[in-house]
């Protein structure tokens, strides 16, 4: 699967890229520094999964999640956030999963394909 990582912080993007490279299901990882970059990359080369960092009350990221799901409904969107305040807004916008930054890395990797029951 192709994964797109969206995070403002270069170190976080690199750490996620390195983690994802350990998963044999992941065939490629692209990174985006912001919402516009993410949408442009999806336009040119759609990903199977988007992992997107969302800060509390980040309405731009919530709008980006909504746009991704409207334009590419089959793309799985995983929200990665430090605070649980982001859960409701992200899921309402169409995110498929929420992973807290405090959870083990294995939780993020399992979220790549886990489907709600």
Image (cartoon, helix red, strand yellow):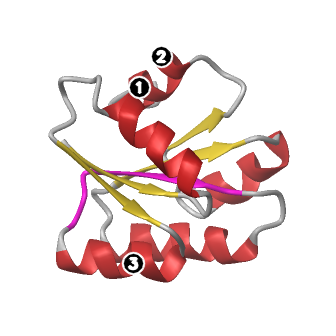
Label located before the other in sequence (3 or 2)? 3
Q: Residue 47: say if magenta.
A: yes
Residue at the spot x=46%, y=39% of the render? 16
Q: Is 55 on the left or on the right of 12, as rendered?
A: right
* Label annotation for residue 106: 2
Which element carries disc 1, helix, strand or loop? Answer: helix
Question: Which image quadrant: the C terminus?
Answer: top left
Q: Which residue is mark 1?
A: 109
Task: Please identify the quarter of the rendering in which residue 1 is found.
Answer: top left
Q: CA distance from mark 3 to mark 2?
A: 27 Å
**Residue 5 horizontal/vertical position (percent):** 43, 53
Label located before the other in sequence (3 or 1)? 3
Task: Please identify the quarter of the rendering in which residue 61 is found.
Answer: bottom right
Residue 61 visible in the current orientation? yes
Residue 112 visible in the current orientation? no
**Residue 104 horizontal/vertical position (percent):** 59, 17
Query: Which segment is the magenta one?
Result: 46-54
Q: Specify few, some or many for label 2: CA neighbours under 10 Å numbering under 14, 14-19, or 20 or more.
A: few
Asked whether 24 or 13 is in front, the reply is 13
Residue at the spot x=68%, y=33% of the render? 101
- Taking the view exactly as shown, the residue that stands out farthest to the front is 11
Q: Which residue is mark 3?
A: 39
**Residue 116 horizontal/vertical position (percent):** 46, 30
């Amino acid at each position: 699967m192709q994964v797109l990582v969206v995070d403002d912080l270069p170190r976080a993007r690199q750490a996620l890229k390195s983690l994802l490279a350990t998963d044999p299901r992941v065939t490629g990882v692209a990174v985006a520094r912001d919402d516009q970059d993410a949408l442009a990359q999806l336009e040119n080369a759609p990903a199977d999964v988007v992992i997107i960092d969302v800060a509390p009350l980040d309405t731009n990221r919530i709008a980006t999640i909504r746009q991704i799901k409207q334009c590419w409904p089959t793309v799985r969107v995983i929200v990665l956030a430090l605070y649980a305040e982001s859960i409701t807004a992200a899921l309402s916008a169409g995110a498929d999963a929420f992973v807290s930054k405090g959870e083990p890395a294995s939780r993020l990797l399992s979220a790549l394909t886990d489907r709600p029951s």
